[in-house]
Amino acid sequence: MRTRDGLIKMLGLCLLAGVLVAGILFPVVGAAGVISNQASDTVESMSSDLADEPPPLVTTITDRDGKPIATLYSQYRIPTKPDQISDAMKWALISVEDRRFYEHHGVDWRGTLRAAISNSSGGDTQGASTLTQQYVKNYLINVTYRDDKLGQQRAQEQTIARKIKEARIAIQLETKMSKEEILAGYLNVVEFSRQIYGVGAAARAYFDTTADKLTVSQAAMLAGMVNNPAVNDPWNNPERATERRNSVLDRMVDNLKLSREDADRLKKEPLGVVPDGPNKSAANCVGAGPENGFFCQYVEDYLLEAGMSKDDLYSGGYTVRTTMDGRANHLAKQSAEEQVRKDQENVANTLSLIRPGKDRHEVIALAANRDYGPDASAGQTEFALPSEIANVTGVGSSYKIFTAAAALERKVLGIYDSIDVPNFYTSRVFIGGPEGCPIVAPNTTAYCLGNASEGSGGRMSLQQALATSPNTAFVMLEEQAGMRSVVDMASRLGLRKTMASNAANGGTPDPNAESAEARQTQTEWFGPKANSPGLGAFTLGVSPTSGLEMANVAATIMSGGVWCPPTPLMQVTDRNGNPYPIKEEPCEQAVPEGLANTLAVGMSKDDQAGGTSAAAAAAANWTRPMIGKTGTTQVNGSAAFIGATPQLAGAAMVFRPDYPNGGLIDGGPGNVYAVEGANSTGNMFGGRTPARTWFGAVSKILEGQPALPLPRSDPQYERARG
């Protein structure tokens, strides 16, 4: 009975083989001929892709000097040419996967029949796919359909149609590629484990060597992994990996590529893989390390915003040479940590640095006291603290830069003109003040405020006001310049993403106010020209803001009013070394050069006696000409310092990233902490931790460089009043 069943199975297999041959070699005639011709076109196209299209490669991020700092990839792969793969590796693979590789033309009919007989007679289950066919399948899974789960399933389904297509592609492929090219192609595409693809990466990751130096034992282990990488992983399953390696050594003996004596000797050797997991870099910006990770993250974000897809970035094999200055980034990180410990709970201290210029604004450093990384318990974070818009904080009175610039442009006053500085002020334009402000309509209060300290009443020049930062004077300037001009100036000078993301305007008058009384109140208090799309507190910097964009504001001022995107890119090249164009926004003259130069002169007194950053500047022995502006938010919960010289612009920010409500205490360098309680008040100011961070880094970065003068002011912006 068993013999009879076996004969029936054999007859069925012969018929099946006939169908396979017919499907591979002969197109169907008649109406189905069109379908067959289309299938033939698909086969031709697929075989051409395998012959010509390279697999995913690792993208490398470097600093400005070309030193690698990180790798981005979905598949860790080091491409290797046929002559860069050891003979031991080639013969180990052929011996275990396709011993007649050099005899067939893509499909091994003898092997197919042998496997069919063994499988039908109850013997060991055997595969019949050649290395060429396996190359086709691995290419489809790991290249063509690497992000398509359904496509991957179709490439592996056990159907006659799939087998026919795979066989036809394999036969076609053998007419386009040499055996050595097919073998190398397979060894470049095949998956091992742990995101490791291809023999070049496997040699590095498992044995810290190169593919051309793989020994027989190493090659046997790798060849034994390919049919089930996870199961044969040498770190997770060393016994299974050893058993599989030894099986490959036996196959090499059978294939007359290794003596029995050598095989037995090699079987006694340990696997020899590197300890503690694969020797490969991280697959994302975590690999840049705690110091350079924030810069790497900004590079990735910048490229994605410029139109590159994440799949392309992580598989294109690009080399991205960035503008990062390794020394400057290290000094920035060092200064940020000197002021605030990296493990300090709920306190982030950041520094963003940009090189000004009229044709480029190059970002050279992005640092924070916290380390970049995934371990939150160690105080690490993967949130781009120095460059992203921190949704929990503002930069305080640093926004007074925009009020001053708008007032200069609208000729409200000049930089040397005097303005009133009352200790307390109630606005006749803005509403929505805190409790205690005058009530001007039912449920509506005027906007009123005082200065941070008493004794600042009287009059002073706009230049002196920028250095001492009286709140009342700048709210009065907002009224005169018009909020629309002030808000627009913030965007023009550099807060492009910040303003687009949240308008940073503190709210707008509601044209759909429910009551006639409310509408009348808005008309009266916002003025007949509806010139105030924001609240009076805008100039006090209460809105979420990007530290990097504030640094770029300083760069724009020091570049004669020319705004450029804060670029992290020097050059991007593709896998073949050819330049790859990245579409970046063009530079533009954001404000007249004379206005920018005059504003720079107006901001030139902050580091001097009486200025809000004078103490920090003196502690750093600072003597260079510079511009500067401090800022502090309500209850001293965040603060900032924006400063620049002709060579370098930057912004330092300290804030509460996790629980934003509450104050910060500055007890000196290394002793900064968040006060418990949502309504708690601290003693933090922009002239303390942020200014010390800025001066501590920039003074060292600029060592050995000349102290360049600031630009001269333009007479038309010096005085607007007689």
Image: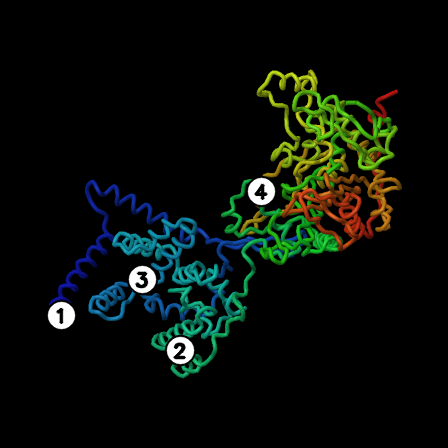
The residue that mark 1 highlights is 2
The tag on residue 258 is 2
CA gap between label 1 and label 3 equals 28 Å
The residue that mark 3 highlights is 129
Q: Quadrant of residue 259?
A: bottom left
Q: Nearer the N terminus, badge 1 or badge 4?
A: 1
Q: Quadrant of residue 35?
A: top left
Residue at 75 percent of width and 45 percent of height: 682
Looking at the rendered structure, the secondary structure element under dot 2 is: loop
The tag on residue 581 is 4
CA gap between label 1 and label 2 equals 40 Å
Q: Nearer the N terminus, badge 1 or badge 3?
A: 1
Q: Nearer the N terminus, badge 4 or badge 3?
A: 3
Q: Residue 96: x percent and y percent?
A: 36, 70
Q: Nearer the N terminus, badge 2 or badge 3?
A: 3
Kindly check if marks 4 and 3 are in contact, taking CB atoms under 8 A apart as contact.
Answer: no
Q: Is residue 563 above or below residue 347?
A: above
